[in-house]
Image: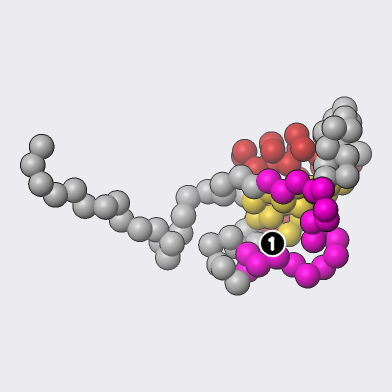
């Protein structure tokens, strides 16, 4: 990973970061100098990505989070995860919604 510094001093929080687009986003932001916090339901996958980022010289922390659970998605009071002035937060959409959060499409009535 070639480290760039355009995001140095910035903090990025990426949901669904254990695989796919979330993982790629975390790697890209870390390569550009951001400290990344990887949130994923799969703690092992998030930690594996965080470890790879750290091995490449980046700064990363993994967090097991179920973003479908409002209580689990509240910001952590830990200073290391609280964004500071001037920081940047960014998220990606994790997988598909769970049945508890899914809603049927609106019904269409009428002609034509």
Q: Please state if 106 lies on the left or on the right of 2 as rendered.
A: left
Q: Main secondary structure of the magenta part?
A: loop
Residue at (91% x, 39% y) in the render = 57
Quadrant housing residue 92: top right
Q: Secondary structure at mark 1?
A: strand
Viewer-proximal residue, 49 or 6? Answer: 6
Region in magenta: 72-90
Seen as rendered, the residue at the extreme left is 111
State left or right for residue 96 relative to residue 23: left
Horizontal and vertical percent position of residue 51: 83, 47
Residue bearing the label numbered 1: 64
Residue 23, position in %: x, y?
69, 41
On-image quarter of the N terminus: top right
- The residue shown at (10%, 46%) is 110
Query: Is residue 68 part of the magenta span, yes or no?
Result: no
Residue occupying the point 56% across, 68% down: 70
Figure quadrant of the C terminus: top left
Q: Is residue 64 visible?
A: yes
In this view, the residue in front, 79 or 54, is: 79
Q: Is residue 67 left or right of residue 38?
A: left
Percent position of residue 100, x then y: 42, 65
């Amino acid at each position: 990973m070639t480290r760039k510094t355009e995001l140095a001093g910035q903090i990025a929080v990426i949901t669904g970061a254990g695989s796919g687009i979330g993982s790629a986003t975390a790697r890209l932001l870390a390569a550009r100098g951001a400290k990344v916090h990887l949130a994923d339901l799969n703690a092992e996958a998030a930690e594996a990505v965080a470890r790879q980022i750290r091995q490449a010289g980046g700064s990363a922390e993994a967090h097991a989070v179920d973003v479908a659970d409002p209580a689990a998605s509240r910001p952590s009071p830990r200073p290391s995860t609280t964004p500071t002035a001037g920081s940047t937060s960014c998220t990606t959409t994790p997988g598909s919604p769970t049945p508890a959060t899914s809603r049927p499409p609106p019904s269409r009535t009428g002609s034509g």
